[in-house]
Image (tube, rainbow, N blue to C red):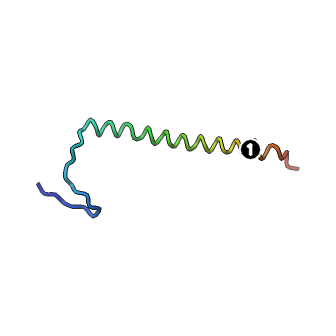
Amino acid sequence: MTVTRQHDGSTDEPDDLKEADLERALRLVPRGAAALAGLAVALIIVGWLLVYLLVFLPRGPVN
């Protein structure tokens, strides 16, 4: 078997990942990314609401 070395130091050797392990990882990773993105959006919305309620509303209407 011929092993070629890539520019980043990795090789083309087959690793010991089983197909089931790979499928499980590919099923779980997008859920975590979606959860992280959802958390970030929720924090931004909560922050905006706090600024609106604690800064803009107490100042009153614009004349």
Question: Dot 1, crowdedness within 10 Å: few (<14), some or many (≥20)?
Answer: few
> From the viewer's perspective, is 47 left or right of 61?
left
Q: Residue at x 66, y 44 (%)?
A: 47
In front: 63, or 23?
23
> From the viewer's perspective, is 54 left or right of 12?
right
The picture places residue 12, in percent across and down from the top left corner, at 21, 55
Q: Residue at x 72, y 46 (%)?
A: 51
User: In terms of secondary structure, where does tag 1 sit?
Assistant: helix
Q: Which residue is mark 1?
A: 52
Q: Which of the 4 quarters of the picture holds residue 4?
A: bottom left
Q: How many marks?
A: 1
Whether 7 is drawn above or below 26: the answer is below
Q: Which of the 4 quarters of the picture holds residue 24?
A: top left
> From the viewer's perspective, is 15 left or right of 40?
left
Q: Residue at x 80, y 43 (%)?
A: 57
Disc 1 residue type (three-letter): Tyr
Whether 55 is drawn above or below 23: the answer is below
Q: Residue furthest right?
A: 63
Q: Quadrant of the N terminus?
A: bottom left
Q: Residue furthest bottom?
A: 7
Q: Residue at x 31, y 37 (%)?
A: 23
The picture places residue 55, in percent across and down from the top left corner, at 77, 47
The picture places residue 36, in percent across and down from the top left corner, at 50, 42
